[in-house]
Amino acid sequence: MKTLRVELGDRGYPIFIGQGLMGQVALVKPYVKGRQVLIVTNTTVAPLYLELCKKAFAGFDVQSVVLPDGEVYKTLETLNLIFDELIGQRFDRSCTLVALGGGVIGDMTGFAAACFQRGVKFIQMPTTLLSQVDSSVGGKTGVNHPLGKNMIGAFHQPECVIIDTETLSTLEDRQLSAGLAEVIKYGLIQDIEFFEWLEGNIERLMNREPEALSYAIERSCQDKAEIVAKDEKEAGLRALFNLGHTFGHAIESGMGYGNWLHGEGVSAGTMQAVYMSMLLGDLSEADVIRVQALFERVALPIKPPLVSEMDNDRFLGLMAGDKKVQAGTIRLVLLKSIGQAYVTGDYPDALLTKTLTDWR
C-alpha cells in the first residue's frame, strides 16, 4: 500500500492506494467518528462491491442508498434520494457518508455531505480510474445543471481517500480509456517526465498491468495533491487541472450528459486546446501530433462531434457558461510547452473561432 497526503492543515487527509483495501476495517475506522454510516453507490457498483464495502464498517450502524448509474442522473433530483435516506433514517450530524463508485457518485455524495445539517464527514472509495486519479481528490463536489456541468456544488474535503486498484478489473474498456484522459492531462500541464513515461508505458495501462496502473494512479494523485495544497479553492494554480475541460464540458452538455463520457470530452477538448496553443505559436505541429498520438493509442476521440447542434455559435455559447468565465471572458487553459500549462483570457477571439472551425 502507498500512502500520500493532501496537506491542508487540520483538514488534510491521506490517500491510500493498493490492492484489496476496500474491506479493511482497520483502514477506515480512524476516520469514522459517529456510529452512523451511509454508503452511497449506484446500480452498477452495488452488485460488485457494496457487501465488501459494508464489511469495512463492521460495528457501525450501516445503511446504503443505491442511485441510478450515469452522468444524466447527476442532478438535484437524484441528490434528494440521498437526503431522503439521511433524514428518513434519522442520521445526525456525527454521521459519515461513504462514496462508493465513480466520479458521479463521489461528486454527489460529497455535495450531500457538504449540505446535510450544514456539513458532515465523508470518505471517498473511488472505483473507476477517472475518479481514482482526479475527482476523488481535492474536495470538489456538485451536480450538473442543463445549462452547465458542475455549476451547483461546494468545496468539501473528504476524511480520507481509499483507492482499491482491484476495482479496475471490472471496469469497462471505455471507462478505462476515459480515465486515462485525466492521467495524460497531468503530464501535459506540469509533469513532462510523467508524459514521457506514459508514451513508453501506455499499452501496459491499457492491458491493466497492476504495477503500471498503481504507478500512474500514485503519480497522478501526487501531482494533484501538491497543487490542491497550494490552491484549495481554485483561486489560480488549481485551474490548470481544467486543461481541455472548458471545451470538453461544452461537448458533454451540448451532446446531452452521458452520451460522451467526461474523459472523452476532455480528450477532444484537450486537443482543441493543444491546437489553439499551436496557433498562438507556443507549440509546434510536431507537438500536436505527439499529443494526438497518445490519445489515439488509448482509443479516445480527438475531435468533437460533427453535428449541427455543435456548430460554432452553439459551442461558444456553452463555453460561455463555464465556471472559469470572468467578466464575460472565456478563460482557457493552454500550453506553453508539453509539461507547462497556463490560464489566460488574453487571446484573439478570432483564434478561438479558428480552433472551433479547424479542429472538427
Image: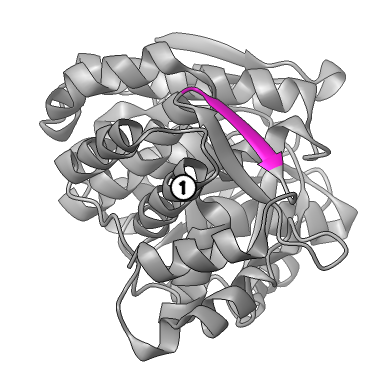
Q: Position of residue 272 (x, y in %)?
A: 43, 54
Image quarter (top left, top right, bottom left or bottom right) of the N terminus: top left
Q: Magenta segment range?
A: 339-343
Q: What residue do we see at 73% from left, 37% from top?
A: 157
Q: Label 1, secondary structure: give it.
A: strand
Q: Disc 1 marks which amino acid?
A: Leu
The one nearer the camera, 174 or 17, is 174
Res. 253 in view: yes
- Residue 152 pos. (x, y %): 74, 67
Q: Is residue 231 left or right of residue 327?
A: left
Residue 340 located within the stretch drawn in magenta: yes
Residue 80, image quadrant: bottom right
Q: Is residue 234 above or below residue 160?
A: below
Q: Residue at x 73, y 30 (%)?
A: 237
- Residue 147 position (above or below residue 304): below
Q: Left or right of 287: which side holds 234?
A: right
Residue 358 screen position, x and y as percent:
37, 65
Is 159 displayed left or right of 214 in the figure? Answer: right
User: Which one is in front, 113 or 206?
Assistant: 206
What's the image's color scheme?
Answer: one colour
